[in-house]
Amino acid sequence: MGEHVPPPLERRGGVLFIGGKSCVELAERYGTPVYVMDEGRLRENYRRLKSAFSGRLRKFRIHYAMKANSNLSVLGILRQEGAGVDCASLEEAKIALMAGYSAKDIMLTASYIDESDLREAIRMGLLVNIDDSSALDSIPRGKIPRALCFRINPGFGKAVFPSLTLGGSDSKFGMDGQAMVACLRTAHEMGVQSFGIHMMAGSGSLDAVYFGQVTERMLEIAVAVADAAGVSFDFIDVGGGFGVPYRTSERPLDVELVAEEVCGALRKTFGNGREPTLLIEPGRYLVCDSGILLSRVRAIKQGRIPFIGIDAGMNTLLRPALYGAHHEVLLANRLEKKTAAANVCGTVCENTDIMARERVLPRMAPGDLVAILNAGAYGFCMSSHYNGKPRPPEVLVARGKSELVREGESIRDVVGRQKVPARLKPRRVRGPRS
């Protein structure tokens, strides 16, 4: 029996398949490293989450947190499914518009936003989420938006890594209750007519009960600040943070229980049928296990624990180096049993460029193909040109067919925007052969 293969991936004749397509064939056609997204799994994840909540609440909407993966094709798939979009910057909002979203379907949640960006967002008709009261000073008094959202810091948070905890006294995000009361009063006096409250207390949690607990805490704050400010909230945005199992030992998040906990907290606070519209902002949950990163083994250095050098590094997938994040690694061309511990590393000139440390893996040889799983979220979007490396292509697979949805870069793309003063130019420039 070979290596365990988690869904939606498949084993066929000892080879790894994604979206009905052989990973070996994908690597041969598009080269490595290459990101591969499974359209079917992406749609399945969205529909599973939507079904869990819409079956319990009439007024409900999903806004995809596009910072997880901003590929235009991914955005297009989720637009077709009926999603709105949550943007962390004005630039992301402009990308969402390019992907076909209308301004009314876009919420902009940008912390410490530039005054000109805030004014442009309002002019564009985006729903703006206010992170701090100082942002209200930047809104032109002749261009007061009808609706605004306000981000609360609920005072606590939970995440798989401390740096991803988005609520609590050490978080840079959101306002405390007292600051929000003052902010709501000011906005009401300015002429804002519709109010929303937003919370994002964590990231990547697999604890379904936690989401009910943090929603209850948020709603306690929401009722108190609304009463104190003399307004009411038309919508409640409980953010995202829905986790996915990065390790084979972890169980998937029970989204039915999450929905029951969150919707139950809403009904308990407002009464059945009188709840405000509920918004959620999943990012990772939708795209993470929809994507993998394929990479070729270049060389193996023997030692106490061998180093398996692959052609994808921290420039391609940053999360292991940045957070110490775990990604399962499979031998895609030969799904064999794990036999011995090894380190999987990239070619970047940093000792933190380790994809998997002291991981028990099958025996590998140069030329083998590895698949790094759960790479659909925070993969390409966090990649860089570090060490002069071009960024890889992205491929979309569906029902046994593949399409290139982002071309791989060349060295000319790495330096193409640079301008060299005439006094620094060499007498003769030799360009790369490819």
Image: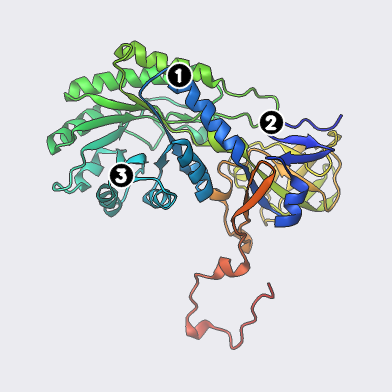
Give residue 234's mark. Answer: none
Instruction: Left or right? Give the position of 13 relative to 23.
Output: right
Q: Is residue 13 visible?
A: yes
Task: Report x, y in % for residue 375.
Answer: 62, 42
The structure residue drawn at horizontal position 68% and vertical position 30%, both measured from the top left corner, is 247
User: What residue sits 44% from the left and 33% below the top?
Assistant: 281
Residue, x 45% and y 26% (percent of image)? 157
Of the numbered discs 2 and 1, the one sitting upstream in the chain is: 2
Residue 313 visible somewhere in the drawing: no
Q: Earlier in the sequence, mark 2 or mark 3?
A: 2
Name the residue: 67% across, 37% down: 327
Instruction: Please tell me the numbered disc located at residue 55.
Output: 1
- Whether pointer 2 and pointer 3 mark residues with C-beta atoms closer than 8 Å, the reply is no
Q: Position of residue 187 (x, y in %)?
A: 18, 36
- Mark 3 or mark 1, which has the lower sequence index? 1
In the picture, measured across the screen, residue 320 lies left or right of residue 78, that is: right
What is the C-alpha distance between the residues marked 3 and 1? 28 Å
Task: Measure the C-alpha gap from mark 2 to mark 1.
Answer: 25 Å
Residue to which mark 3 is pinned? 126
- Which amino acid type is shown beneath numbered disc 2? Pro
**SS under mark 1:** loop
The relative height of residue 251 versus residue 6 in the rendered view (above or below) is above
Give the quarter of the image for residue 9. top right
Query: Disc 2 vs disc 1: Cβ atoms closer than 8 Å?
Result: no
Question: Furthest residue to the bottom?
Answer: 427
| Label ID, residue 7 | 2
Mark 1: which amino acid?
A: Gly
Q: CA distance from mark 2 to mark 3?
A: 37 Å
